[in-house]
Amino acid sequence: MANLDRRSFLTSLAAAPILAGAAGSALAAEGGKRYRACIIGDTEHGSYGHDVHRVWGVRDDVDVVGLADPDEAGRTKHGQEANAQNLYADWREMLEKEQPDLVAIAPRWTINHKDYLLACAEIGAHGFMEKPLCVDLAEADEMIRAIEAKNLKWSIAYNFRVTEIVQHLKKAIYEDKVIGSPLEIRGRGKEDNRAGGEDLIVLGCHVFDIMIWLLGMPTWCSADITWNGNPATPADVMEATEPLGPIVGNRLQATYGFAKGIPGYFASMKSRDVSGTRWGLDICGAEGVISVRMDVIPEVLLLRDPSWTGANGAQWEPLPGAPEQVMENEHLERYAPIIHDLIASIEENRLPAVSLQDGRNTLEMTQGVFEAYTAGKTVELPLKERSHPLTRWS
């Protein structure tokens, strides 16, 4: 019964709407509170993600009181870009002295994410974190218990879902029914030098976030993983190019079971083609296909053809009714809708639309691939065993 309850909870999170980014400006103007914000960065070990140190710059009611980075040159550079009032070599010292209301956790490397988050929760700070969430589900559970125990609001950097074009995508599918009934959903990673296990972790999470948002949480996963064309073995387990926990395989294929019998697929394969142009997902329906290719503003196209081939003369076209979105300064605006919604969630005492809990949802799908392959069978989601599957494989 505990698993069923948790599955219902995860599915309800996936259905949460996103607050329009423009509303944040009004909230900033009308609200009387000013927020003290800090930034945890590390130039040498995980850096600042995609300009995560700039996220508080979209709010007039947030003062950046501190930035921490053990690298002096990086600390100075990023501190200036973030308009930080004080600079620190030690992030723990910064949190203790500044006692911020908000913290941005910027490093891409996941190995320290839990420590950063638990320290922020200890002082009662809300915040924003670069993805992926953490190394394994045991860490994710501990992190989320810590913020929920103090009713803290934390968002994660799933910026593609909150773009206006992707928000319109859901309406096009379920209200306008431009592809008829959804039949399956297919995702691929960037398939660059990280193809396979690392691609699954780093870039698959964006694909999974949109899958869950459209279809809810899957209930099972099966997978196949190879290394240089041969079935992956425990001897092939290695560390990722960045400290993200163990990985395996340079080719993988996963299948997921979503509600109403809709299958989902994710694949990543090392090949000579490293263009990254397949990174994204296709939603295939009874009357056509919608293609989503990731970019700062994703490219979303529609093919009105039940055969999914264009053989009847159908051509790819822009999604009807899609808003024209212009991003004048992607360094500053990339996460603006998430940050505005985060502040609103604090003031309205609700879960952020893009939450740390969403980060755990995508990690369920990531870890499910490794669990299914190492177990040699289809596994149920959420996973019962929360430690990393590759550390238990022998």
Image: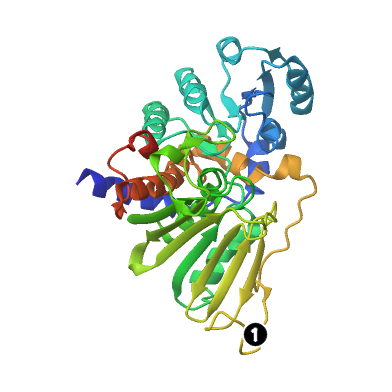
Residue found at the far bottom of this picture: 312
Quadrant hosting residue 360: top left
Name which residue type carries label 1.
Ala
Q: Position of residue 20 (x, y in %)?
A: 61, 51
The number of discs equals 1
* Left/right of residue 371 with respect to residue 305 in the rendered view: left
What residue would you read off at disc 1?
314
Q: Nearer the viewer, residue 152 or 61?
A: 152
Above/below status of 103 relative to 19: above
| Residue 215, above or below 239 | below
Residue in the image at 58% along x and 41% along y: 157
Query: Quadrant location of residue 72?
Result: top right
- Helix, strand or loop at label 1? It is loop
Name the residue at 58% across, 26% down.
Answer: 103
Judge from the rendering whether residue 87 lies leftward or rightward of residue 137; answer left or right: right
Crowdedness of circle 1 by 10 Å Cα count: few (<14), some, many (20+)? some
Depth check, front residue: 101 or 29: 101
Where is the C terminus found, in terms of image quarters?
Answer: top left
* Residue farthest to the left, as pictured: 1
Q: Position of residue 49 (x, y in %)?
A: 65, 35
Q: Residue at x 71, y 37 (%)?
A: 58
Q: Nearer the viewer, residue 321 or 390?
A: 390
- Camera sees residue 218: no
Q: Where does the image place residue 82, in percent across and percent down from the top left?
A: 74, 27
- Give the side of residue 36 with respect to residue 390, left or right: right
Compared with residue 156, is residue 282 higher up or lower down, i.e. above or below? below
Q: Position of residue 301 (x, y in %)?
A: 65, 70
Instruction: State the colouring used for the structure image.
Output: rainbow
Can residue 268 be spotted in the picture? yes
